[in-house]
Amino acid sequence: MRLLLLTTAALTGFSANSLLTRAALQTGRLDALSFVGVRLVSGAVMLWLILRWRREPAIREDGSQGSAAALFGYAILFTVAYILIGASVGALILFGAVQVTMIGAGIIFGERPRAADWLGAGCALAGLLVLTIPGATAPNPLGAAMMAGAGVAWGIYSLHGRSSRDPLGATAGNFRRAAIPGAALVLGGALADYAHATTSGLLLAVASGALASGLGYTLWYAALPELSRMRAAVLQLTVPVITAFAAAALLGEAISARLAASAGLIAVGVWLTVRSTPTRDE
């Protein structure tokens, strides 16, 4: 039950990030680089405040330079790519790259997925295709490359989290390091007269950083040690569907037959993978 709650909350945070990013960037409320910077800085501040209030853990971690670099790379590549390509094809490229990165790493490090694992992953990917392919046009090559890079960076960040025993400390340390180049983005944009911001755009970026990212990524790091690489990869394919249903509930967007079919395929794929794969590597 604990793992289910952690994973569900983390994936919901990922979905919230997509909605908040879309609300800020597609309406022109905040420029992309400022959004990244404010998101990382606000996440670092939120986690620093929580660290001050918690009891000292038995094992204390402080993240790493590699994880922070992956976090920063994901944040900037994802955000800039988001304004160059459509959300649907972007989700396909992003989560496809995450799958390749995490499942490939699992195979390299000795995981041997069974037939049911591959069937589940294939079914979930088919669900993602059903959701994203109809109506999609050829993406901007630069945007597609950046989104693929974002997927690889996020896959690496997730892989690093599988060894964490202090999710809050590790996530706080990663955000603290990533916030330094994040703040530089905001300052550089202001000096170059590139930045533009509205109050609502800044609030959306703060919500993305402090809540959906800072807290959401901490919960993800708490869940990852109990997940195999394949299971963690396949579970993330639920995020576009959660986002679509959330958009329907919050923004009044229609729930189409295609979305329902996609959700069904992804649910079956996740069930097959979760049912088949051990929670930890042996």
Image (tube, rainbow, N blue to C red):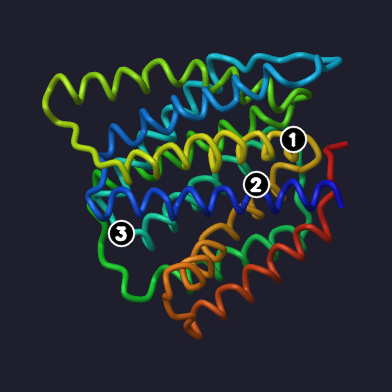
Give residue 8's position: percent from left, percent from top: 70, 53
Separation (CA) of disc 2 from disc 3: 24 Å
Separation (CA) of disc 1 from disc 2: 9 Å
N-terminal of the pair, mark 1 or mark 2, is 2
98 displayed left or right of 224: left
* Quarter of the picture holding the C terminus: top right
Q: Between residues 129 and 51, which one lies in front from this camera angle?
A: 51
Q: Amino acid at mark 2?
A: Ala
The answer to whether the residues at label 1 and label 3 have Cβ atoms under 8 Å apart is no
N-terminal of the pair, mark 2 or mark 3, is 2
Separation (CA) of disc 1 from disc 3: 31 Å
How crowded pointer 2 is (Cα within 10 Å; few <14, some 14-19, many 20+) is rated as many
The residue at which mark 3 appears reads as: 86
Q: Mark 3 falls on what kind of element?
A: loop
Q: Amino acid at mark 3?
A: Gly
Q: Quadrant of residue 105?
A: top right
- In the rendered view, tell whether residue 219 sits above or below residue 42: below
How crowded pointer 1 is (Cα within 10 Å; few <14, some 14-19, many 20+) is rated as many
Q: Between residues 126 and 44, which one lies in front from this camera angle?
A: 44
The residue at which mark 1 appears reads as: 222
At a point 24% along the width and 50% down the height, the residue shown is: 84
- Which mark, by number, is residue 170? none
The answer to whether the residues at label 1 and label 2 have Cβ atoms under 8 Å apart is yes
Q: Quadrant of residue 30?
A: top left
Q: Amino acid at mark 1?
A: Ala
Q: Nearer the viewer, mark 2 or mark 3?
A: 2
- Which mark, by number, is residue 10? 2
- In the rendered view, tell whether residue 134 sits above or below residue 179: below
Q: Between residues 96 and 38, which one lies in front from this camera angle?
A: 38
